[in-house]
Image (cartoon, coloured by chain):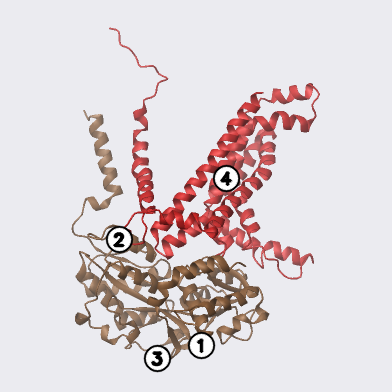
Amino acid sequence: MLDRRQMMMTALTLGALHAFPGISRAQARRLVFATFTGSWEEAHRDVLVPAYRKMTNNADIALDPMLSVDQIAKVTAARANPPIDVMLHDPGPALVAIGQDLVEPYPVAQSAYYKDLISDAQVETGPAPFFQVVGITYNPDKIKTPPTSWKDIWDPKYKGRVGITNLNSTLGTGWLVEIARMHGGSEKDVSAGFKALEDLKPNLGAVAANPGQLATLYQQGQIDIGPGNFNAIQILKARGVPVEFVAPKEGAIAFKTTIHIVKNTPNKELAFKLIEAALSPEVQGKLMESPYLIVPTNTKVKMGGEVAKALAKDHADMKKKFVFQDWVEINKQRSAWIEKFNREIKI
Amino acid sequence: MATAFPPVTRYELKLAAPLAGFYLVFFVGPLVLLTIVSFYTDTKMTAFGLTQYARFLLDPFSLAVLASTLWLGLKVTLLCLLLGYPLAFVITRSPNWLQGLLIIVVILPLLTSVVVRTFAWIVILGRQGIVNSTLMALGLADTPLRLLYTESGVVVALAQVQMPLMVLPLITAISRIDPNLQDASSALGAGAWRTFFRVTLPLSLPGIVAGSLLTFAAAITAFITQSLVGGGQMLFMPMYLYQQASTLNNWPFAAAIAIIFLIAVLGCVTIFNQLGRLSRGYAQV
């Protein structure tokens, strides 16, 4: 007869195996790529993963979408045996990950594509396969003359109709730096930007908690104009929301999204191959097309479609039109700015 | 053969062991870790000290954030009580078929996600929302009023979202009151209001305390509703914590904020409980 205790043990073991699948296969593990959630995951699943499979003769891969901060937390918690092999980061978190010694330098000498990247994307701690671009978003149903400059947002006719995000996001922080620059400031000194924000208060209809929420506010008619992420706006537009994106004449703000091999990964070779796939002109070319519209960094990719129309017709044009920011400087003071924003910006 | 049967009313503590083990590993353990992290003085977590606590407790801005969060909780609780008590009262007095229907209506919000309920409030309170378009159609307002991203907006939305937590304990407490007591009160010459204030209300105090506790705790920690309806410029403790932990990677400070918040909430809970204890004495007199 089956002993009650034995049955309990079996049940517990089965339960534990289910809860901690790592127990049963601690050694060989498939490649884990922590991408971002939402449209990023979709794009990577549909384009990047098939390309990687082709390159590696069908090696196994898992996408584990999560925020940058969670990627860092997970890797920090298990430095010797990280649960993630490849990380994806915005500029701020990338510097944190590098600062905490969580990333492996990219084996530039072995890379077939690294040298073809535009110079801003060539980063030895982890190259940038994609750009995110921030420009002016507006509702063409309500705003008939398209805005041309960041300054237009301060126009009194937009009273109560402007939306921004707070500084928790890369978008919010990058935009503050840009308007500071416009008024004579820099990454080292954004006080001019805060002054400009103060002047913007009558126009502010919303300070969204995150860029995702900011985008949905156009849909609800809560706001009609403000800074916005090119890709987020394209997604809304594809769903029939009346939104348009314009690159302001001061230049659209470009953020590097960098991809990193995690230190101590057991899958270093496969991680390298995945990143190579992400840098390849084939993958970047496909991701540039609709519906992904991700800005390529490989100069071998010929710009086309909506990206060429709204942003830049080639990589030389891109260098002229995009504004890159110094996030090493920004990160030094970001916490002080967030604190200042917490205290001063109340609408 | 005389076998001593164990008394049937005695339960063995061992039965609670699996749950206790679960709590030990997934609640007590992390809480201890959190406390340890809060005593680090730097973000690299190398030295111990009280800097994080000093930074919070000596900073008027941080204290104001804590105070406004507790104040928000109080306002939501009062609003829930004000709206929820009559509702619970009516439910206990209605005929059976209506009672079932009303309880389903009360529970319904619990069956949808908080995110969905909160988004509904964004639609209601927005510039082109139901409230504003009605006001403008009636000619009561020329330009849309700002309802979203205001503290009153947050209070109203939270009150709706947390209402079931207040109403359900109230229903239980009120329906347990012996109707004979109210009859006796009126037979002895007390009017409806007097009966309510001297009999019904004191006897339902345990329900009020339980409902208030739940609503208060849920309202002050409601990160999603607070940030979506309040926006990115209205700072309450959960958002403050999130900002430090996630955007700034300052885990020790975030941990200290969490511990201070926890202690403040425990303090409030103790006060509520004291009120409850007082009420028990009052109800018996």
Q: Local crowd at mark 3 within 10 Å, few (<14), some, or many (≥20)?
A: some
Give the secondary structure at mark 1. loop
Q: Label 1, on which residue?
A: A250
Name the residue: 34% across, 45% down: B29
Q: Colour of chain B?
A: red
Query: In the rendered structure, are the residues bearing label 4 and label 3 in contact, judged by CB atoms less than 8 Å apart?
Result: no
Q: Quadrant of residue B20?
A: top left
Question: Which is more foreground, mark 3 or mark 1?
Answer: 1
- The earlier-in-sequence mark between 3 and 1 is 1
User: Disc 3 is attached to a residue of which chain?
Assistant: A
When the figure is inspected, residue B199 is found, relative to residue B245, above or below; the finding is above
Q: Amino acid at mark 2?
A: Thr
Disc ID at residue B215: 4
Chain letter matching colour brown: A
Question: Is A320 situated left or right of B193 in this image?
Answer: left
Q: Label 3, on which residue?
A: A314
When the figure is inspected, residue A168 is found, relative to residue A110, above or below; the finding is above
Q: Label 2, on which residue?
A: A76
